[in-house]
């Protein structure tokens, strides 16, 4: 079974080498590693070029944003399943992919869902994000599993489409709604911790971002003709605050 891993980056010289080395450390041999760069102006490309035995394919060109770049990576991928690792994240350990492959080989599914941990820049783990109790119905109240912890069968994108460029922040949410809630793809929770993710990011940086994400989640549900209650989407911040206080 061949696995394609996609990293999207732009001016990522501070973190991209750590991410590449994380892919290099994986003990699973049938890996295709694709990097899609948005025409970086710093040292990112020079770092990528130092790892020709790790990076299977890469391109560097202007794009229309994160999800346009992801779509380019998906179109370049030739693996049976596709996963992502962000340019400032790493895999949880060197066995992450091999554990996922073993799980996929014993389960005839179109997607596997796992867990992640989030950490500070000093490496201290501050949150464990588990999908153990997640179900597609929870998309209606604003909750989705960790995006990087999902491995999709390649042909699902060919059948159901890629990320919609109508969304700035929540195109991943819309895709998951479309795949899991509208089209009912087959999936299973693996219980495998797949990634270490750096705290922060485009969709987790303050109230204004939270408000924008909520608006796009509502838009995504409406686009896919899924019945929901908007107040439940907007009030999910209460559960986020409760979870934060609980961790404290």
Image: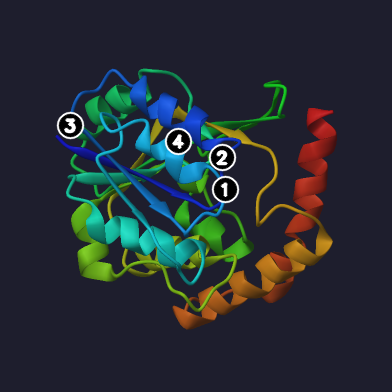
Label 3 belongs to which residue? 105
Q: Secondary structure at mark 1?
A: loop
Whether residue 35 appears in this view of the structure is yes
Marked residue nearer the N-terminal end (1 or 3): 1
- Say which residue label 4 marks: 47
Q: Tell me the residue that label 2 is attached to.
A: 13
Tell whether label 1 touches label 2 (CB within 8 Å).
yes
Disc 2 element: loop
Measured from the top left, where is residue 11 in percent x and y?
Answer: 57, 50
Q: Nearer the viewer, mark 2 or mark 1?
A: 1
Q: Position of residue 196 (x, y in %)?
A: 55, 30
Looking at the picture, tell me which residue is in the foreground, 24 or 190.
24
Quarter of the picture containing the C terminus is top right
The residue that label 1 is drawn on is 42
The residue depicted at 57 percent of the width and 38 percent of the height is 88
Helix, strand or loop at disc 3?
A: helix
Q: Is residue 230 left or right of residue 247?
A: left
């Amino acid at each position: 079974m061949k696995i394609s891993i996609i990293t999207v980056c732009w001016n990522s010289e501070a973190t991209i080498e750590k991410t590449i080395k994380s892919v290099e450390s994986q003990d699973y041999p049938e890996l295709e590693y694709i990097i899609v760069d948005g025409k970086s102006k710093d040292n990112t490309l020079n770092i990528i070029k130092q790892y020709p035995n790790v990076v299977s394919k890469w391109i560097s060109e202007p794009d229309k944003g994160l999800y346009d770049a992801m779509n380019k990576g998906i179109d370049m991928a030739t693996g049976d399943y596709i996963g992502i690792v962000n340019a400032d994240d790493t895999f949880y350990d060197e066995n992450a992919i091999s554990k996922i492959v073993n799980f996929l080989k014993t389960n005839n599914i179109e997607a596997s869902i796992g867990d992640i941990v989030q950490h500070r820049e000093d490496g201290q783990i501050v949150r464990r994000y588990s999908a153990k109790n997640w179900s597609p119905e929870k998309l209606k109240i604003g909750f989705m599993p960790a995006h990087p912890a999902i491995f999709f069968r390649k042909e699902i994108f060919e059948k159901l489409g890629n990320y919609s460029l109508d969304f700035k922040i929540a195109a991943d949410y819309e895709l998951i709604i479309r795949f899991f809630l509208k089209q009912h793809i087959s999936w299973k929770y693996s219980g495998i911790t797949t990634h270490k993710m750096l705290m922060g990011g485009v969709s987790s940086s303050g109230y204004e971002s939270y408000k924008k994400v909520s608006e796009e989640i509502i838009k995504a549900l409406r686009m896919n003709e899924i019945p929901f209650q908007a107040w439940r989407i907007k009030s999910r911040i209460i559960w986020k605050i409760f979870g934060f206080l609980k961790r404290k």
